[in-house]
Image (cartoon, rainbow, N blue to C red):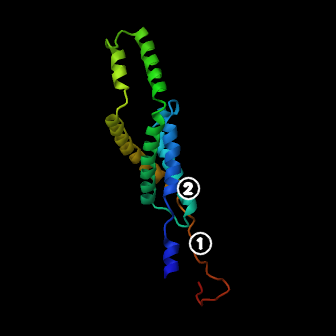
């Protein structure tokens, strides 16, 4: 009985979740690749499901994919937030340059936009935590979607072939 329970035990989710979440979070946090921010949690969740499917001897369900994907999305949000911290000054300069160029061609920017930019880009712990919470919610939802997609692509194991009747045995049934 105990051996049967061990064979039914699910493999660990931690490694697939962390690998998929770290990959998605790292790419989301980079300035150039961050513009595809909604794509990375979906792809990271699909990677997590792929890694989990390699470890499991059974087919994964859509619920398994949604759970793994949601956790990978949360991990991606944390990693993305941590990657963005050291790159904050580079992102600030990019935004400042973009707005300066835009101001050269239009007069529609409000007066004092430089002051607004300085105030809005200051890092504070409450704003960081609120942003992390909102990102975690959004990434978890996108990750659940990616996990379900990943199960449809990678999570199905081939089923056992049906038993083929042995033609050498005569069952006594004959067609007229």
Q: How far apart in space, not on screen, are marks 2 and 1 (Cα)? A: 25 Å
Q: Which mark is residue 51?
A: 2
Q: Which mark is residue 161?
A: 1
In the image, 171 versus 12, the foreground residue is 12
Displayed quadrant of residue 67: bottom left
Residue 66: x and y in percent read 42, 54
As drawn, the residue found furthest toward the bottom would be 172
Residue 167: x and y in percent read 66, 83
Number of numbered discs overlaid on the protein picture = 2
**Would you call the spot at circle 1 few (<14 residues within 10 Å), some (14-19), or many (20 or more)?**
few
Displayed quadrant of residue 118: top left
Residue 46: x and y in percent read 51, 50
Question: Relative to 58, is 77 on the left or the right?
Answer: left
Measuring 46% from the left and 44% from the top, which residue is drawn there?
A: 76
137 is higher (above) or lower (below) than 151 = above
Measuring 65% from the left and 88% from the top, which residue is drawn there?
A: 169
Residue 133: x and y in percent read 35, 42
118 is higher (above) or lower (below) than 41 = above
Q: Please, what secondary structure does the residue beneath circle 1 have?
A: loop
As drawn, the residue found furthest toward the front would be 125
In the image, 80 versus 163, the foreground residue is 80
Measuring 45% from the left and 47% from the top, which residue is drawn there?
A: 75
């Amino acid at each position: 009985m105990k051996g049967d329970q061990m064979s039914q035990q699910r493999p660990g989710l931690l490694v697939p979740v962390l690998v998929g979440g770290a990959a998605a979070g790292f790419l989301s946090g980079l300035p150039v690749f961050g513009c595809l921010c909604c794509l990375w949690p979906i792809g990271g969740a699909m990677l997590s499901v792929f890694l989990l499917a390699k470890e499991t001897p059974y087919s994964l369900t859509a619920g398994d994919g949604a759970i793994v994907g949601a956790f990978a999305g949360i991990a991606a949000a944390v990693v993305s937030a941590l990657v963005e911290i050291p790159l904050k000054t580079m992102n600030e300069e990019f935004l400042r340059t973009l707005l300066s160029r835009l101001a050269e061609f239009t007069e529609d920017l409000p007066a004092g936009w430089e002051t607004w930019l300085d105030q809005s880009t200051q890092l504070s712990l409450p704003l960081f935590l609120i942003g992390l919470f909102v990102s975690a919610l959004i990434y978890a939802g996108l990750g659940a979607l990616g996990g379900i997609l990943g199960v449809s692509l990678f999570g199905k194991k081939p089923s056992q072939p049906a038993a083929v009747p042995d033609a050498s045995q005569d069952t006594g049934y004959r067609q007229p």
